[in-house]
Image (tube, helix red, strand yellow):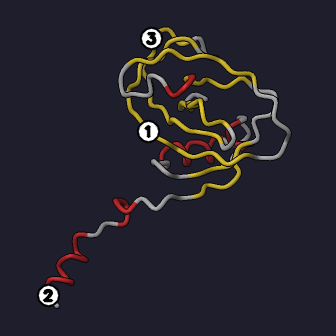
Amino acid sequence: MEYVHDFQGFLNESELNEGTNFGDITSALGGGDDKVFADFFKKAKTNDTFEYAPNGVELDYLPNGRGFSQGEVDLEIKQTSRDAKPVKCTVVAKRKNVILNGGTMEYEGDATDVIYFKMDGDKNNIYILTETF
């Protein structure tokens, strides 16, 4: 019985990473609610989900998931044309001080924290969010 109690003492809820669903954050990503976006960016971790309706916006992405790392990444821009219905997105990684090149903000070797995510229905690309999204 002692062993079970000791083992449970090692369990840490944050390490279980069951995934949090942040709900629809479309308006926060569109600049409508900076507090919601800042809270999401701070708390998001691998396997968390959120919903986003990227209708007619340009998103920074890495085609075929290439370069999804801690170091330097070259971004491409994708024009989205989805309807207004939100799509489920899943956080695949969160990295600090990633050096970005290109993209919608025309990054020129700027280092920033990023969230890499995938959108349901798009298995080939990994999209990114930065704190300055």
Q: Going 25% across and 77% down the picture, which residue do you hit?
A: 8
Q: Earlier in the sequence, mark 2 or mark 1?
A: 2
Extreme bottom residue here? 1
For the residue marked with disc 3, what is the amino acid?
Answer: Gly
Vertical relation: 23 (above or below) 7: above
Residue that carries the numbered disc 2 in the rendered image? 2
- Residue 43, given in percent of the width and then of the height, sits at 48, 50
Identify the element where label 3 is drawn.
strand
What mark, if any, has residue 94 been given in the picture?
1
- Residue 109, given in percent of the width and then of the height, sits at 44, 11
- Residue 89, given in percent of the width and then of the height, sits at 63, 45
Real-space Cα distance between discs 2 and 3? 54 Å
Q: Earlier in the sequence, mark 3 or mark 1?
A: 1
For the residue marked with disc 1, what is the amino acid?
Answer: Lys
Q: Going 38% across and 26% down the picture, which residue do you hit?
A: 97
- Residue 60, given in percent of the width and then of the height, sits at 61, 23
Q: Going 56% across and 47% down the picture, which residue do you hit?
A: 40
- Give the number of marks: 3
For the residue marked with disc 2, what is the amino acid?
Answer: Glu
Extreme left residue here? 2
Dot 2 crowding, Cα within 10 Å, few <14, some 14–19, many 20+ = few
Extreme right residue here? 83
Dot 3 crowding, Cα within 10 Å, few <14, some 14–19, many 20+ = some
- Where residue 98 sits, quadrant-wise, is top left
- Where residue 30 sits, quadrant-wise, is top right
Identify the element where label 2 is drawn.
helix
Q: Is residue 67 left or right of residue 10?
A: right
**Label pair 3/1, CB-CB below 8 angstroms:** no
Extreme top residue here? 108
Vertical relation: 60 (above or below) 43: above
Residue that carries the numbered disc 3 in the rendered image? 109
Real-space Cα distance between discs 3 and 1? 18 Å
